[in-house]
Image (cartoon, rainbow, N blue to C red):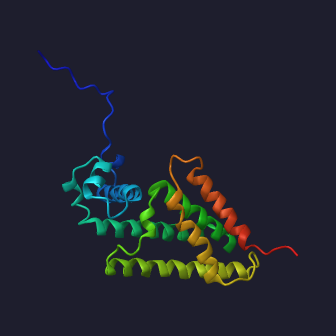
Amino acid sequence: MVAPPPDSSTPKTARWNNALADAPDPREIRKRALIAAAGRTFGVKGFHNTTLDDIASALSVTKPALYRYVKNKHEILYECHGLAIGMAEEALQSAESESATALDALRLFVSLYIRKMTSELGTCVVLTEYYSMTEQHSALIQQRRRVVDTQLRALVSRCIDEGSIAPCDPKLAVFFFMGAINNINRWFTEKGATSGEAIAEAFADHVVLGLRPTKR
């Protein structure tokens, strides 16, 4: 008896969370998928309670397949933080190049950064966990964070100079809105009532309205 052909209508488990093999750089895309999936798994089980088997299961691949991209959990944690700070760098660069005023750039940065985080990282509570990183990894991430922080303070200063926000301490202003933004991953969920896009727009409005001069 000839075996019937496979039923193409039967859904298959999406390996690497649908990262495409024919993409220009499939290795980089798969690594990015691994990092995002790991971040979500860390958010559910906690960094110390998550195993590489858990992460492999979330991606529907074998654990040996993970070792082609990362060495251990600590490297994944570092890559999670690297991915997040990379999103901030990309958002800031885009906002600066696409905006006519400093205030427009500030608002666009907040919106773009939150959209990137919620669409790719989702619930990634591990981004608030710095102390589990190795000393070397922590130093590298902190160096990149300082660069972004300096650029954001300069952007806030330009907003003050153009009169679009009230005079303030740029350092405290950046701490104010970046603290709120970086805390989103603690409570955001893709299945929640409010979408990432809606959160991005609401936070962008709150930042702008919170820094604008008050009418006397």
Q: Residue at x 33, y 27 (%)?
A: 9
Residue 168 higher or lower than 115, as above or below: below
In the image, taking residue 103 as reference, residue 86 lies left or right, namely: left
In the image, taking residue 212 as reference, residue 192 lies left or right, namely: left
Image quadrant where residue 150 sits: bottom right
Residues 35 and 91: in front is 35
Q: Residue at x 32, y 42 (%)?
A: 14
Residues 105 and 204: in front is 204
Asked whether the viewer can see residue 174, the reply is: yes
In the image, taking residue 179 as reference, residue 122 lies left or right, namely: left
Residue 150 higher or lower than 3, as above or below: below
Spot occupied by residue 180 in the image (x, y as percentages of width and height): 58, 68
Which quadrant is the C terminus positioned in?
A: bottom right
Residues 170 and 97: in front is 170
Q: Residue at x 38, y 82 (%)?
A: 139
**As drawn, which residue projects farthest toward the top?**
1
Spot occupied by residue 101 in the image (x, y as percentages of width and height): 69, 72
In the image, taking residue 178 as reference, residue 60 lies left or right, namely: left
Q: Residue at x 41, y 74 (%)?
A: 130
Spot occupied by residue 30 in the image (x, y as percentages of width and height): 32, 55
